[in-house]
């Protein structure tokens, strides 16, 4: 693979109750365990950051394939839900639901574009076969 860009970040402190910062300073966040997992929930957490990144990346892929197909992708949006829970090996695992909104397309047209985007998106390619990812087309 020819690398086009590399993001770099450092996590410090007490892991999920620590701090994360990119080397360029554009992301600089306090981290805390969500209250649902026994933490104080005052800071952000890795799942929120992953959800934001996946939503943005998938939306970019969706807009790319939409433009290639000549589809009306105006007012499009992608939401991501990232869940975390225990796995059967004593660790933890993620599960993702992507919610795609393409209000100017039929449900079938929107699903076709969402499926194409799922093949293009780097996050989808990285997670495929590793975690459950469900792609849903919103009822607009």
Image (cartoon, grey):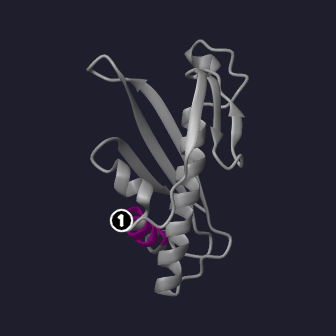
> Which of 115 and 33 lies nearest the eye of the viewer?
33
Judge whether 52 appears above or below 45 on screen.
below
Confirm whether residue 138 shows in the render. Answer: no
Figure quadrant of residue 60: bottom right
Observer-nearest residue: 17 or 34? 17
Q: Residue at x 43, y 62 (%)?
A: 121
Q: Secondary structure at mark 1?
A: helix
Of all residues, the one furthest to the bottom in this rendering is 70
User: Residue 10: image x %, image y %?
Assistant: 57, 36
Residue at 58% of width from left, 68% of height from top? 102
**Image point (54%, 35%), residue name:** 47
Query: Is 35 located above or below residue 29 in the figure?
Result: above
Q: Quadrant of the N terminus?
A: bottom left
Residue 73: image quadrant is bottom right
- Read off the residue under disc 1: 119
From the top left corner, tell me how far across and down residue 90 is, in percent. 31, 16
- Image quadrant where one finds the C terminus: bottom right
State the image quarter where residue 114 is shown.
bottom left
Q: In the displayed structure, would residue 110 be above or below residue 132?
A: below
Instruction: Please determine whether, in this image, residue 120 is positioned above or below residue 78.
Output: below
How many neighbours does mark 1 have within 10 angstroms: few (below 14), some (14-19), or many (20 or more)? some
Per the rendered image, the range of residues in magenta is 110-119
**Who's the residue at 45% across and 72% down the image?**
113
Q: Is residue 55 magenta?
A: no
**Camera-side residue: 104 or 77?**
77
Residue 15 appearing in the image: yes
Majority secondary structure of the magenta segment? helix
């Amino acid at each position: 693979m020819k690398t086009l860009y590399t993001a770099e970040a450092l996590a410090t402190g007490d892991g999920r109750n620590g701090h994360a910062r990119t080397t360029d300073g554009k992301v600089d966040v306090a981290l805390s365990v969500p209250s649902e997992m026994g933490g104080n929930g005052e800071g952000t957490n890795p799942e929120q950051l992953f959800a934001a990144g996946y939503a943005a990346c998938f939306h970019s892929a969706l807009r790319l394939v939409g433009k290639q197909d000549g589809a009306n992708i105006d007012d499009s949006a992608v939401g991501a839900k990232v869940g975390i829970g225990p796995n059967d090996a004593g660790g933890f695992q993620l599960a993702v639901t992507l919610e795609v909104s393409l209000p100017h397309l039929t449900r079938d047209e929107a699903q076709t574009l969402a499926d194409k985007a799922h093949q293009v998106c780097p996050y989808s390619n990285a997670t495929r076969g590793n975690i459950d990812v469900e792609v849903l087309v919103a009822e607009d």
